Image: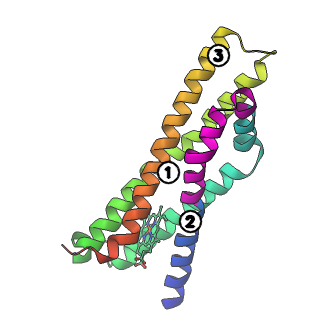
Amino acid sequence: MDFVLLVLRLLHILGGIFWVGGALAMAFFITPTIMSTAEAGQKFMGHLLTQTKFSRMMTIAALATILAGFILYWIDSAGFTSDWMVAGPGIGFGIGAFFALIGFGAGMMIPRGGAAMAKLAAQFKGAPTPDQQEQMTALVKRQKMISAINAHSLLAAAILMAVARYLRF
Ligand code: HEM
């Protein structure tokens, strides 16, 4: 059992570092850079999200974190039956998991937005027409909002995961 727990914790924590770290870098540094570099940035975003393994690796890390997290929760709560679930740690890990799932849902929408931006940017012949510019502004705004929901939910999940074990109520 110790070995299984060790493997699950490694998968969970290493997956979480990669997933949350990638999402925070994306929301707080890469997306703002894309916003301020106009067409070049939009092409970069499209390439990153559709032509590299970034999205796939993020999905794999997220699924490994979530799956290992649910198994750890199942073990800690003796198969979702013990009082641990309604004490501080159980509630803390549970709310953390809730935020992680919101972050996951938002994260799944990011590549689609990137692909739509890349498709639109590929139609530009020189400067975008006012209509194309309007569509791109709407796409960028949506992408920024989804990225913010993704990053803030994952940050909340990581904070709760870090402190849950020590919550006493
Ligand atoms: C659905 C998603 C998640 C579930 C169900 C979940 C569940 C859990 C559970 C039950 C534990 C306790 C493990 C144990 O007893 O050894 C734990 C620990 C931990 N989780 Fe999560 N987790 C999730 C997402 C995340 C995310 C997104 C992160 C991001 C960094 C994360 C980071 C951690 C860390 C660092 C610990 C170790 C805490 C400690 O040892 O005190 N988890 N998680």
The secondary structure type at the circle numbered 3 is helix
Identified at 59% across, 22% down, the residue is 137
Q: Is residue 90 left or right of residue 75?
A: left
Q: Is residue 35 magenta?
A: yes
Question: For mark 3, what is the residue?
Answer: 133
C-alpha gap between disc 1 and disc 2: 14 Å
Q: Residue 17 bears which disc, if any? A: 2
Label 2 residue near ligand 1, CB within 8 Å = yes
**Element class at badge 1:** helix
Kind of residue indicated by mark 2: Ile
Q: How many marks?
A: 3
Q: Is residue 31 visible?
A: yes
User: In the image as oriented, which residue stretches furthest toward the left?
Assistant: 169
Instruction: Name the residue at 76% across, 39% down.
Output: 47
- The stretch of residues the image draws in magenta is 19-42
The residue lying at 49 percent from left, 49 percent from top is 151
In the picture of the structure, the residue carrying the numbered disc 1 is 104
> Where is residue 12 drawn, in percent x and y?
52, 70
